[in-house]
Image (tube, grey):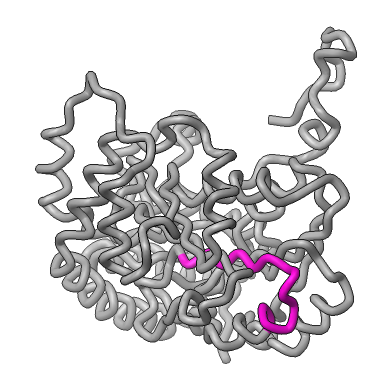
Amino acid sequence: MIWSMKSNFSPNLTPRSEVVATLPAHHGALDFAELEQLGLEPDSILDFSVNSNPYGPSPMVRQAVAKVPLDRYPDRESLGLRRALAGYWDIPAKQFLVGNGTAELLWLVTFAFLRAGDRVLVIGPTFGEYSRTAALMGAQGEFWSAPAEDDFAVIPELVERQIDQLQPRLVFLCNPNNPTGFLLAPEIIGTWATNHPDILFVVDEAYQAFAAEARSALTQRLNNILVLRSMTKDYALAGLRLGYAVGSDQGLIQALTQTRPAWNVNALAQAAGLAALADRLHLRQCLEKLRQAKEKLILELSAIGLPPVPTATHFFLVRVGDGAGIRLDLLRQGLLVRDCASFGLPAYVRIATRRPEDNERLVTAIERLVKGSALAGNERLALVRY
């Protein structure tokens, strides 16, 4: 929703100019109002638009959540979960801050570190909340976008040149990246951070579990790298919202702690996080099944003339021509993919691998669209052969 300038508010009640000027970021997942307009029930939709674990949370999570007393305030410091994370990472608990999903942590980062007029570099195409939260603080967003002709690969020397020229206060990087699935070696991030010790590098590693070869930027042990992690994706806790920030410099974590709301992580999410971390076997099994399903899905899409962009993750881009139109065609069949216009890629959709039987339904539906486009003699669904 865009703020109406025809408001009858007095000048003292008018929002800050940054609030008026900043547009909402567009996200995937179900739009319940849209489904209602189309006469569709949410439970009837197979959602390929979210990059989460389709096998769901560990049974231990459901058991733990059922035991949480709802009449008691949660631990405001998330001590138990921070200690469990410390054991998981072999990093002191004081270097962690738990948040209400990675999205809240982004808000805390910009609130704690950005001032009006600061420059922020966003390495894209990527998640819209990086630039949005910066803009709401009055910061000046700048972009370096990976080229489509290089399969959206980040070119380190070009990014470094951009950093040298802009001298931003903060750099946002999603690794592996959403929506492209491109994975950057942590040593490259470490080189940037070492060469620019006065710049804060915020590395969103929400999807690292889905990339078998991924290594965290935490391995660089640099004070100007802050890593954000989501537990809503790999552990399938999206309905509860859970994530955490971790950094080598305790001062970064303390700054975020100073800005967070009281009781920002509810008791159900904390209990779920503890249980999820305790069941490592469940996650390993889910990731292996997802890896196999992804390989098959990519082969099947390639066979019908729609080869995905190379990816390190279980989600990927597919060039289809009219991304928004294809999304709507599939949604009417009960299948939701993510059109990528909000990433600046209107010719693409993003697809996240689901269970094999779900993937088969998607491939069948897309194949029908391909044949229908060919019979109609139009290019609504553009076949891209490399």
* Magenta residue check for 201: yes
Is residue 52 placed above or below 153 in the rendered structure? above
State the image coordinates of residue 26 (x, y, percent, origin top left): 61, 47
Quadrant hosting residue 3 = top right
Q: Give the quadrant of the N terminus.
A: top right
Residue at figure coordinates x 73%, y 49% from the top left: 134
Image quarter of residue 280: bottom left
Q: Specify whether residue 293 is in view.
A: yes
Is 82 in front, or is 286? 82
Question: Which residue is more in the foreground, 105 or 331?
Answer: 105
First to last magenta residue range:
192-205
Q: Position of residue 37 (x, y in %)?
A: 49, 30
What residue lies at 80% left-to-right and 31% top-to-bottom?
A: 20
- Residue in the picture at 52% in, 44% down: 257
User: In percent of the image, x 28 and y 55: which residue is there?
Assistant: 83
**Location of the C terminus (image quadrant):** bottom right
Compared across the picture, whether 162 is left or right of 291 comes to right
Count of marks overlaid on the render: 0
Is residue 200 part of the magenta span, yes or no?
A: yes
Residue 363 image offset from top left, x and y in percent = 35, 69
- Above or below — where is 155 with respect to 18? below
Residue 174 percent coordinates (x, y): 57, 68
The answer to which of 367 and 34 lies nearer the viewer is 34
Q: Nearer the viewer, residue 148 or 336?
A: 148
**Residue 304 seen from this side:** no
